[in-house]
């Protein structure tokens, strides 16, 4: 299907439409589907995922299909689509914060972030999708409202989502610690608490929202799930006890996640006074025993951390050498150039001087040879010219004699 309307129409006719489409995608006997069509189907499935908030089985099936599709086509279109949805949630969250200072997220926001944790690695600190997503999640936690038991339940879902995101990376989120302290102080009577964090009245209206007023037995209680849509009564002690028990379970998980941090002693210290007060004043035996277990866990973690903790120590400074006033020695003149030079450099200078000297002598010898050759050539040329002139004179004398004899013969005739 090319859009969500066609998908909903096919699903209304046949409930097995998603499995049928997935079989068609994986059928190797048929020609492969273009990646552009698969990317479009990914967007359609993502739109349909956001419209469903109650059918857990269908949500799980769509999440698996989205994961398989992302493995087939992980291109810029799918990435930009998810980032655009994150931007829309960010704009909506900022509008609520600007109007009311504190926000109350809906179920689609939580389910979408759970889907991102299912599709992409949450242990990567610099991921192009999970890093903005966890930033948005922390912003929602930092501005979450705690006015009623329903808002506390949504906050517990956000806490569970953060726990799922950081379970492997053990990333420290200070906002979650502050929120856990604010939640636990709602279950502690103010007059008996030794540690108290002030908060705005827009965030918390009743400072004793989770304080139990009568005896409660949690042996038959059910766990909170994200698909619970029933309204919680703020005056119902069973609802308070259920939320408080869920909170204590999350607190145990976070203490176990952060037990390897060197600052866990200071992180867990504010919870001790609240847990002691709740264990002594609560009217639920299960919660009291659970608080004492958490106190024992905190003591064990703190003791282990303090034994293994190594404080920073300033390194030993090396002794600085004293600046002594030493005389500056100049070169010694011994009638020749100072030869206190490195051996290689001195040899190079010696060879250079020898080369210059030999080059000069060779040049002088070449000049002398050239002048000698020129003189010899000139001498030979002069001798040749002298011989030629003498022969010419002899020839002229013989001709004149012959001419005289010839004239005498003419006269006698």
Image (cartoon, rainbow, N blue to C red):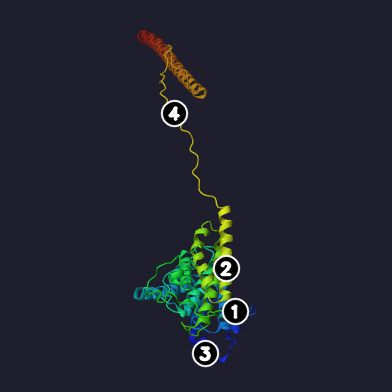
Q: Position of residue 136 (x, y in %)?
A: 44, 70
Residue 70 falls in image quadrant: bottom right
Residue highlighted by disc 1? 25
Q: Position of residue 315 (x, y in %)?
A: 50, 42
Rounded to the nearest angstrom, the CA distance separating label 2 from label 3 is 55 Å
Q: How many numbered marks, from 0 up? A: 4
Residue highlighted by disc 3? 9
SS at circle 2: helix
First in sequence: mark 1 vs mark 3: 3
First in sequence: mark 2 vs mark 3: 3
Residue in the picture at 47% in, 79% down: 149
Does 153 appear above or below 177?
A: below
Rounded to the nearest angstrom, the CA distance separating label 3 from label 4 is 90 Å
Does 241 appear above or below 322?
A: below
First in sequence: mark 1 vs mark 4: 1
Label disc, if present, on residue 322 of the rendered structure = 4
Residue highlighted by disc 2? 292
Verify CB contact (< 8 Å) between mark 2 and mark 3.
no
Between disc 4 and disc 2, the foreground one is: 2
Between disc 1 and disc 4, the foreground one is: 4
Instruction: Pick whichever, 66 or 313, lies toward us.
Output: 313
SS at circle 3: helix
For this orientation, the residue located farthest to the right is 29
Residue 208 falls in image quadrant: bottom left
Rounded to the nearest angstrom, the CA distance separating label 1 from label 4 is 81 Å
Rounded to the nearest angstrom, the CA distance separating label 2 from label 1 is 54 Å
């Amino acid at each position: 299907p090319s859009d969500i309307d066609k998908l909903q129409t096919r699903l209304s006719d046949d409930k097995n439409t998603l499995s049928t489409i997935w079989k068609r995608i994986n059928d190797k006997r048929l020609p492969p589907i273009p990646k552009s069509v698969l990317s479009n189907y990914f967007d359609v499935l993502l739109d349909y995922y956001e419209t469903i908030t109650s059918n857990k089985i269908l949500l799980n099936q769509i999440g698996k299909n989205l994961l398989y599709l992302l493995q087939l086509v992980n291109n810029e279109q799918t990435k930009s689509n998810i980032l655009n949805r994150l931007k829309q949630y960010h704009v909506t969250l900022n509008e609520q914060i600007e109007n009311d200072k504190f926000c109350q997220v809906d179920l689609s926001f939580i389910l979408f972030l759970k889907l991102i944790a299912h599709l992409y690695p949450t242990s990567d600190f610099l991921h192009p999708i999970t890093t903005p997503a966890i930033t948005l999640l922390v912003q929602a936690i930092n501005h979450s409202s705690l006015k009623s038991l329903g808002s506390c339940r949504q906050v517990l879902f956000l806490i569970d989502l953060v726990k799922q995101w950081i379970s492997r990376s053990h990333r420290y989120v200070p906002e979650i610690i502050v929120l856990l302290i604010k939640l636990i102080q709602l279950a502690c009577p103010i007059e008996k608490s030794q540690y108290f964090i002030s908060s705005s009245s827009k965030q918390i209206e009743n400072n004793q929202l989770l304080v139990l007023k009568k005896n409660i037995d949690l042996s038959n209680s059910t766990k909170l799930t994200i698909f619970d849509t029933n309204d919680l009564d703020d005056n119902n002690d069973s609802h308070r006890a259920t939320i408080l028990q869920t909170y204590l379970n999350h607190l145990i998980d976070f203490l176990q996640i952060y037990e390897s941090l060197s600052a866990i002693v200071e992180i867990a210290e504010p919870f001790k006074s609240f847990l002691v007060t709740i264990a002594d004043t609560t009217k639920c035996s299960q919660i009291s025993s659970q608080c004492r277990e958490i106190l024992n866990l905190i003591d064990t973690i703190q003791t282990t951390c303090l034994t293994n903790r190594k404080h920073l120590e300033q390194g030993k400074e090396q002794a600085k050498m004293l600046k002594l006033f030493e005389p500056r020695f100049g070169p010694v003149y011994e009638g020749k150039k100072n030869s206190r030079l490195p051996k290689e450099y001195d040899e190079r200078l010696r060879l250079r001087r020898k080369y210059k000297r030999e080059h000069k002598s060779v040049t002088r010898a070449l000049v002398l040879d050239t002048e000698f050759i020129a003189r010899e050539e000139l001498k030979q040329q002069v001798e040749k010219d002298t011989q030629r002139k003498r022969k010419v004179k002899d020839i002229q004398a013989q001709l004149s004699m012959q001419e005289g004899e010839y004239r005498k013969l003419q006269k006698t005739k």
